[in-house]
Image (cartoon, helix red, strand yellow):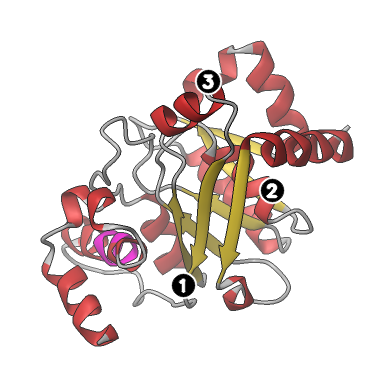
């Protein structure tokens, strides 16, 4: 069933999108790392399976979708981990740590939900908590062009939507903080988001558009 679903994802996305990928040589060999992405539209989840067809990956998904029979079915075969976004979910965290220890690849949007205004929101510290505690490598990936309105308009006009996936260089966060954890973990999260943000068009940077760290990273590219 998984092979069929992956085949179907490729067929559908090839029909409605034209995908350009770059920087994927930055992905560490062997799995066991995290890919952090921005979240513009509902295409972003299937796009992960399209771009990482040969990888053993899993994706955290909001717990509300577990009540949807279609998502529950897909989750069983495509390795969804349903996560409570509003409360500490120790069961989900243990599940993710176990999968990572087995060499699976985590694909996660730190924002927690798609950007309905098409701009980055401030990231939540879940991934930075796990990555700093476990020493995981993080690969920032910018998704460009998956805004729902673009897709809808192009489908109505029988056009394929151009989508760009840009992977940055892998990095690790400093060790898990012993003091001021909430503040420092948010700083770690903002670092992840800024690493994604420098690869996005200015129109999509949202909360991070004027962030000092993003400006510092942009200046370092010149």
Q: What's the magenta region?
A: 188-193
**Mark 1 or mark 3, whichever is nearer to me:** 3
Return the residue nearer the eye: 36 or 33.
36
Q: Which mark is residue 50?
A: 2
Secondary structure category for the residue under label 2 = helix
Secondary structure category for the residue under label 1 = loop
Tell me if residue 152 comes above or below residue 194 in the rendering: above
Image coordinates for residue 175, horizontal then vertical, percent: 36, 76
Residue 77 included in the magenta stretch of the image: no
Secondary structure category for the residue under label 3 = helix
Work out how far the residue at label 1 is from the one at label 3, CA to CA, in angstroms: 33 Å
Quarter that holds the N terminus? top right
Q: Check disc 1 and report the residue beneath it.
A: 168
Q: Check disc 3 and report the residue beneath it.
A: 156
Whichever of callouts 1 and 3 sits on the residue coming sooner in the sequence is: 3
Q: Is residue 195 left or right of residue 36?
A: left
Label 3: few (<14), some (14–19) or many (≥20) C-alpha neighbours in 10 Å: few
Residue 15, quarter of picture: top right
């Amino acid at each position: 069933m998984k092979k069929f679903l992956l085949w179907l994802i490729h067929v559908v996305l090839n029909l409605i999108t034209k995908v350009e990928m770059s920087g994927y040589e930055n992905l560490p060999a062997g799995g066991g790392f995290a890919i952090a992405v921005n979240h513009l539209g509902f295409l972003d989840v299937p796009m992960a399976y399209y771009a990482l067809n040969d990888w053993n990956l899993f994706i955290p998904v909001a717990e509300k979708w577990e009540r949807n029979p279609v998502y529950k079915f897909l989750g069983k075969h495509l390795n969804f981990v349903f996560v409570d976004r509003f409360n500490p979910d120790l069961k989900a965290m243990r599940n993710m740590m176990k999968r990572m220890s087995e060499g699976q690849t985590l694909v996660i949007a730190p924002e927690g939900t798609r950007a309905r205004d098409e701009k980055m929101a401030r990231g939540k510290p879940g991934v930075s908590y796990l990555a700093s505690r476990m020493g995981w490598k993080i690969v920032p990936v910018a998704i460009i062009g998956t805004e729902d309105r673009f897709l809808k308009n192009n489908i109505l006009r029988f056009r394929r939507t151009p989508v760009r996936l840009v992977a940055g260089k892998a990095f690790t966060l400093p060790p898990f903080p012993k003091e001021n954890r909430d503040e420092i973990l948010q700083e770690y999260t903002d670092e992840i988001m800024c690493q994604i943000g420098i690869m996005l068009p200015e129109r999509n940077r949202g909360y991070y558009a004027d962030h000092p760290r993003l400006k510092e990273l942009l200046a370092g590219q010149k």
